[in-house]
Image: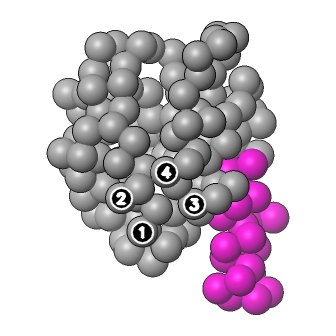
């Protein structure tokens, strides 16, 4: 595992998943996304299927066009949003409309997000290379 601390958040790079926590008060926009995408591409390359888990522990905003942009990355298998706080105003449902259908999901527990994220990557790998699996 590799940890990258950027001005706007901390990101942990695991073999098939990135777990990120955006800092309090940040507006996560296209320029910040481009910086993160560049680092992820340097780490994983362009062909490695992976998922992203967002730990929503801080209050911050996100430009939904980030999801529209990220949906063009074929090997980004899914985005899991972990929100432990019960909020009536969760933005995950709205954000999901800007990403691949059924591939941006909200969870309350990190463990559930990891299981789902690994399943998404495993299914992608199976489609790309029948006979190869993370399991």
> Where 53 falls versus 59 (above or below)?
below
Q: How crowded is mark 2: few (under 14 residues within 10 Å), some or many (20 or more)?
A: some
Q: Are marks 2 and 3 in contact (CB under 8 Å)?
A: no
Q: Mark 1 points at which residue?
A: 72
Q: Mark 4 points at which residue?
A: 98
Q: How crowded is mark 4: few (under 14 residues within 10 Å), some or many (20 or more)?
A: some
| Residue 64 visible in the current orientation | yes
Q: How far apart are marks 2 and 1 (CA)?
A: 6 Å
Q: Residue 1 carries which label?
A: none
The overriding secondary structure of the stretch rendered in magenta is helix
Stretch in magenta: 116-135
Q: Distance between the residues labelled 2 and 3?
A: 11 Å
Q: Name the residue under label 3.
A: 100
Q: Residue 69 carries which label?
A: 2
Q: Distance between the residues labelled 4 and 2?
A: 9 Å
Q: How far apart are marks 4 and 1 (CA)?
A: 11 Å
- Work out whether mark 4 precedes mark 2 in sequence or the reverse, and give the earlier one: 2
Which residue is at the front of the view, 63 or 113?
63
Q: Do the residues labelled 2 and 1 touch (CB within 8 Å)?
A: yes
């Amino acid at each position: 595992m590799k940890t990258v601390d950027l001005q706007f958040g901390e990101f942990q790079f695991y073999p098939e998943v990135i777990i990120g926590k955006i800092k309090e008060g940040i507006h996560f926009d296209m320029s910040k996304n481009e910086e993160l995408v560049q680092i992820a591409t340097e780490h994983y390359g362009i062909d490695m299927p992976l998922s992203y888990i967002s730990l929503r522990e801080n209050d911050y905003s996100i430009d939904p066009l980030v999801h529209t942009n990220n949906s063009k990355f074929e090997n980004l298998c899914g985005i899991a949003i972990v929100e432990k706080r019960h909020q009536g105003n969760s933005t995950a449902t709205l954000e999901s409309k800007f990403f691949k259908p059924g591939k941006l999901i909200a969870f309350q527990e990190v463990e559930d997000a990891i299981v789902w994220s690994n399943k998404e990557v495993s299914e992608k790998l199976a489609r790309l290379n029948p006979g190869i699996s993370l399991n």
